[in-house]
Image (cartoon, helix red, strand yellow):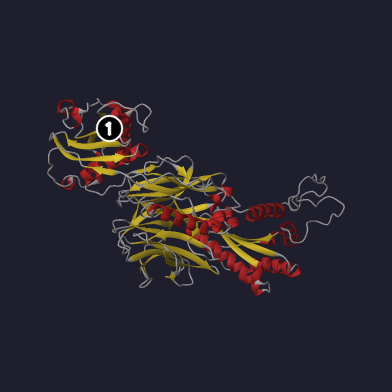
Amino acid sequence: MKHTARTLCAFAFAIALAAPAWAQNQDVGEPLAEGGEVEALTIAGEELEDEGPLRGTVTATSDWQDLGIAIPSFATDRDQPTPANADGTAALGREIARVITGNLRNNGLFKPSGPDRLPKPSFAQITDPSWSSWSGRGAEMLVHGYVRARSDNRIVVGCYLYDVALQDELIREGYVVRPADWRRAAHKCSDLIYARLTGEDPFFDSRIAYIAETGPKDRRVKRLAVMDSDGANHRFITLGSATALTPRYSPDYSKILYLSYVDGNPRIYVYDIGSGEQTLVTENRNPTLAPRWSPDGKTILYSMAVAGNTDIYRVSVKGGRSARLTSTPGIDIGGSYSPDGSKIVFESDRSGTQQCYVMDADGDNQRRITFFGGRCATPEWSPRGDQIAFTRIAGDFNVAVMTPSGRGLKVLTSGWQDEAPTWAPNGRIIQFFRTTRNSGRSSLWQVDLTGRNERRLPTPVDASDPAWGPIRP
Amino acid sequence: MNKPAKIALLLAVVSATVACSKEAPQELPPEPVNTSRPAAAPTPPPPPRPTGPMPGTQAHFAGAVGNSTTVYFDTDRFNIDSADAASLQAQAQYFAQYPAVTFTIEGHCDERGTREYNLALGERRANAAKNYLVSLGIAASRITTVSFGKERPVALASSQSAWAQNRRAASVVIN
């Protein structure tokens, strides 16, 4: 009965939205089939002493890189067919180990060796490693795991981290996932290993929204797209008939804010991932730009040009009146909340050039924080709160970080145009897009806070405007 | 991009072609008449009335004002300099002569600015051109503005001269 009432209500709502939705949705594709959850599973075994992460001994990134980790195939109790892998659960176990190895290797973390070069442990050895066969391989750490196809069609993945020298278990965790979400179990296991060995927060089980680019420089087709943090599960959301720009995932991954020219003008839409519908962030004839979420997902920041002058506004995600936060004659645009939601760092050219400013969340106490020469654009507050990443314009564009007070400038990249940094959920890695001189081709890159570990992210076509979402629940 | 905007863009490209090749030989044979787009042919349409494009089309506007359909800006600036003023005066004359014509001013930037800032800067440039035309007596209600930031360059190199061509506000007649 309750269910029926809810269905009717949803139906009425759909009708009410139908008219405007038709025109607004003409550039969006079919909704994504998402929403699978990872259920944590307590794995029975000896009680572990929680000694905390190895932060005391592993303090610098360079030290992590020397830590050898063996990641052999995950074992299975019984090789069974599974929708997650055409060759069954044993093959799935090897794939999971490959994903974990790729995660660690691609991010310059540790010295992982993967399942293709290692012996295959049996199911019984997962909780009782054959130490003698691992001690001579130059790996200080050993990852074991298992895959089990459950009768309810879900998959159980167990993940164990061992210290080879101590011959001791450091941590273990289990995950129950839909077959379609098997990679998430591999990401959760990667996160467990990373967090245990470095003391940092996890980041692998997260997604990235970005703009996929194709076509010649003067007629670029720009589509909204999403993918996992390792580039897997790639999906296009918009069809490309309208230019899409500057997406931002909502903190709960249910929506994406982005700019679209679908009605011929630049306007911000809220795209609902479940329904595939989108709505204007504010009913208004003025162009709206540079959308951002508050950390709690309840407030949307946007910038709006009125008679040519752009200022920053704030509106509840439920709609209603917008509050204007800036009112200078210059361009005030963008904005990024501090993790506690109390402050906003934004960009303004009120001094004559683009510089970064901080204000309270209600717009009070606006003050410039960048005074180091060059310009400051697209500031993004780290999820840890301790740094602000931004596009530093000093001839070329480069990604740089500074403290929230504008000190400790550190330039991390050296491309011709490196633009629009976005933080990993743990505030330790930054993604950005790099544009190539003359050709205008763009690609996604990431760099860690040392600036040493830089790599290009694989995308099916050219890519820009990455927006890294938080860790998934 | 919606259809009118797409057509407008096409027309803008055509008009730019016209402007750059105004010395094109007039004795070329006329284009075949199988095209239905009135503005597509840079040469005058075929007989019976070889009087050029119809008023109210981008081709007619471009034919009347020449290179003045577009004004150009210095890096990061949006002020109307004397060259821009002359172009906008030519535009104002045209729009005063054809009071039924409505048009869009497209603001653009070069690639040497960040994407979001350039969207705002393009909006500023389009509005600067609009305000100047309004000051010359053109009704604001006839003018719409749209910014494309750095998303739609006309010159494709990464050079000073290309950037100078891309920092622009282009007036495009709405058909």
Residue that appears at 24% across and 28% down: A77
Q: Amino acid at mark 1?
A: Arg
Compared with A348, A199 (above or below) is above
Horizontally, residue A381 falls left or right of residue A54, namely right
Compared with A430, A107 (above or below) is above
Q: Nearer the viewer, residue A347 or A187?
A: A187
Q: Mark 1 = which residue?
A: A148
Pinpoint residue A350: horizontal percent, then vertical percent.
45, 69
Tell me the chain of label 1.
A
Label 1 Cα crowd, 10 Å radius (few <14 / some 14-19 / many 20+): many
Horizontally, residue A54 falls left or right of residue A416, namely left
Horizontally, residue B23 falls left or right of residue A271, namely right
Image quarter for residue A174? top left
Pinpoint residue A459: horizontal percent, then vertical percent.
44, 41
Compared with A76, A295 (above or below) is below
- Does the image show residue B158? no
Secondary element under disc 1, as helix, strand or loop, is strand
User: Furthest residue to the right?
Assistant: B48
Residue that appears at 46% across and 54% down: A271
Pinpoint residue A272: horizontal percent, then vertical percent.
45, 53
Q: Nearer the viewer, residue A185 or A191?
A: A185
Pinpoint residue A54: horizontal percent, then vertical percent.
17, 45
User: Furthest residue to the front?
Assistant: A1
